[in-house]
Image: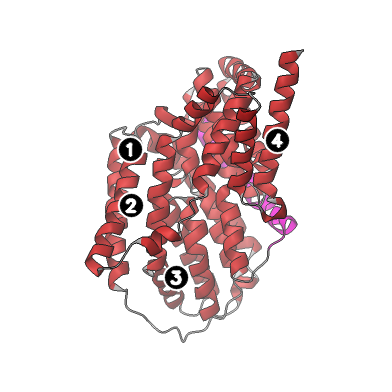
Amino acid sequence: MLISNTALTIWAVAALATCGVILRPWRIPEYVWATGGALLLTGLGLIPLRSALAAIAEGGDVYLFLIGMMVLAELARQEGLFDWLARYAVRHARGSGQRLFDLVFAVGTLVTVFLSNDATAVVLTPAVYAACRAAKAEPLPYLFICAFIANAASFVLPISNPANLVVFGSQMPPLLDWLRQFSLPSLAAIGLTYAVLRITQRRQIRHPLALDIDPQPLPHGARLCAVGLVLTGALLLTASALDTPLGLPTFCAGVATTGLIHLRQRRSPMAVLRHVAWGVLPLVAGLFVLVEAVAQTGVIEQLAQALAALAHNSPTQASWVAGTGVAIASNLMNNLPTGLIAGAMGHLVELPGQTTAALLIGVDLGPNLSITGSLATLLWLVAIRREGEHVSAWRFLSLGLLVMPPALVAALWVLALQA
């Protein structure tokens, strides 16, 4: 009875904290809810302090990865690299909204693949909005691209989404194995996402664009930043190929690129560091503790055992159940805690590679259903609100119901064909 009451209390605290992260009542930041829940569980003795600290320590590689990527993204924003890319896309659209749609989709895909989905949501979104205003175009069809491609292209590479590090942890596949497993499902997801968005937004993007977009030279700092980003991408691809954790290389690349550019310009990097969303780090740490507490109740182990049993009897069926289940769960509790639970399941039992891959696809692609599905989508929502645009949860859901299911089914189907 005592164990049952303890478990119920843990689940209640974790549920309330997760709801706080998703809904942000009273505009209290997400990290306050996550860390508050973690501190409450620890203070009440529902999770031992040693276990809580160990759970936080498990995210070391994730923290380093996030710091490096956030610093690089903010550096690119301040140096004007993404604004230049957006204006470049508008000028090369040559007055065609449909061509601009294709260019924004291509840029968004590349940014997501090589800089992570959070960079697409936080940095590219304001640039696309500015470009649309300059082109006198309705911004929302192009802003929707930033939201949906941030998740659809987020499992092309291990570095494309921090959730990838959470799901696999220290068991991250080598780069070639990753590409062999996820390249075709990623292409299917990206292709279906493009097709549905293009069809649903076809009326808005038919309107001609302004042609008087003044060409601007790429600023020197942005040019240096672009070189740093390319070298960072090469470093991370090498680290993936050598089956090396990605956190430390990403952190070092971000610090080195920022330091070298500001040293050359003889400016302080504090402007970059001051605008980095540092609250993401305690948010992730708090979620690690919440998931560890839930895991100690045994519910995650039970789910893992059930999935392992299903995978033993029918790997294909297990993959469909796993991918669909976590895709739905990502929209109920956000994909970051869902990814943590999926990663915990992979550590508790031995799952086939196909099933683990399906879990990752569900965690990455599932959030395209709702506006609260992923951290990247929440960051996108904040970014467009700053520009004066508003998208209700229902409007996003009505579009997500058209975009996400075909992409998820296609990705899981291709994954099953590869098995």
Three-letter code, disc 3: Ala
Q: How many marks?
A: 4
Quadrant in which the N terminus appears: top right
**412 in magenta:** yes
Three-letter code, disc 1: Ser
Q: Which residues are magenta?
A: 391-416
Looking at the image, is 117 positioned above or below residue 217? Answer: above
**135 in magenta:** no
Closer-to-camera residue (210/159): 159
Residue contact at pointers 4 and 3, CB within 8 angstroms? no
* Residue that numbered label 3 is attached to: 86
Residue drawn at point x = 66 percent, y = 47 percent: 22
The dot on residue 240 is: 1
Measure how far apart labels 1 and 4 are at the Cα level: 35 Å
Image quarter of residue 159: top left
Q: How is the image coloured?
A: secondary structure
Residue drawn at point x = 63 percent, y = 61 percent: 199
Looking at the image, is 347 positioned above or below residue 158? Answer: above
Measure how far apart labels 2 and 1 are at the Cα level: 17 Å
Residue drawn at point x = 75 percent, y = 56 percent: 394
Of helix, strand and loop, which mostly describes the magenta segment? helix
Three-letter code, disc 2: Gly
Q: Earlier in the sequence, mark 2 or mark 3?
A: 3
Q: Secondary structure at mark 4?
A: helix
